[in-house]
Structures are given as C-alpha cells and as structure tokens.
Amino acid sequence: MLSLIQRVTRASVTVDGQTVGAIGPGLLALVGLEPGDGEAQIQRMAQRLLGYRVFADDAGRMNRSLTDTGGGLLLVSQFTLAADTASGMRPSFTTAAPPEEAERGFNRLVEVCRARHGGVETGRFGAHMVVDLVNDGPVTFLLRP
C-alpha cells in the first residue's frame, strides 16, 4: 500500500461534473493498493495518515498531525500509484492489486479512518475523477505502511 499525501488548503473530487468529496485545510491522500495488502497494512496506513506530522506548530515546525489540527482527509483511490515504472516507456500494472481486492482494501481504509477521525471524504472508486487541490507549501510525501 502506498499513499501520496499532500497538505492542502482545500481539495475536491468531481465525477461527471458533480462534486463527490471536498475538504478545506487538511490532507489529500492518493492511495494505491498492492497485492496482499491486508488488515495490518490498512491499520498502519490509517495510523500514519492521521498521525503524520506535516502541519506547523506555533514555532512554524512540522510538529502537528491531522489528528492534532482536526483538518479534513480526502482519500482518493489511485491504482496507477502502484504501477511498475522501472523499465520501458509504459507503466505496468502487474504490481497493483486486482480491482476487487483494491476496492475492498480501499473501502476498509476509509472505514478505519472515519472511525478514528471526523471529516473524512472520498472520491469514487473506479470512476474517472477530476481532483482539484491547492497544495499548501508545497508539502508532499510518499507513505508506506
């Protein structure tokens, strides 16, 4: 499981011209699942998403987490994140979880995050999504469980 997180002042996801998820200040997390990702990886990723310290404290240092700030979390499934790009000029998706497995894992991640934190929004699994964001910093990190 991988998650590309971006600290944002706002972010939203639109499907077929309709907004399906939107947050104000917080984190946008693009999530890619790999074969074999299970409950341990989901629990650890939820812990990292909510606890990773990327927000400024009173001294301006990155010492506060999403849990500390109460900001929003926008989770967007993105299977291309798990692509194998090591060779050639076209990505291979053999390293990404099959769609049914990825959807189950992504939905479970959403469930776990919602149980631990208010303000969790999502895109729509498998849909063509337009993601709009204002990256704050810019601050972007790639997380693994």
Image (cartoon, rainbow, N blue to C red):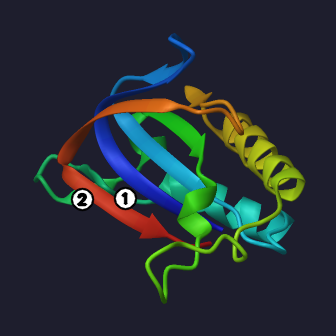
Q: Residues within 10 Å of mark 1 (few under 14, many from 20)?
A: some
> Which residue is drawn at the image coordinates 50% and 11% (left, top)?
17
Q: Residues within 10 Å of mark 2 (few under 14, many from 20)?
A: few
Residue 124's disc number: none
Disc on the earlier residue, 2 or 1 = 1
Real-space Cα separation, disc 2 to disc 1, in angstroms: 6 Å
Direction from residue 142 to residue 44 in the image, left or right: right
Q: Quadrant of the N terminus?
A: bottom right
Task: Determine whether 25 is above or below 40 in the image.
Answer: above
- Give how far across and how far down residue 88 sits, in percent: 47, 85
Label 2 secondary element: strand
- Give how far across and how far down residue 131 sits, in percent: 43, 33
- Give how far across and how far down residue 94 sits, in percent: 73, 75
Provide the residue designation for mark 1: 53
Question: Which residue occupies the foreground of this view, 77 or 86?
Answer: 86
Provide the residue designation for mark 2: 62
Residue type marked 2: Met
Direction from residue 103 to residue 84 in the image, left or right: left
Task: Determine whether 17 is above or below 52 in the image.
Answer: above
Question: Which residue occupies the foreground of this view, 125 or 139?
Answer: 125
Q: Are the residues flagged by discs 2 and 1 in contact, CB closer than 8 Å? A: yes
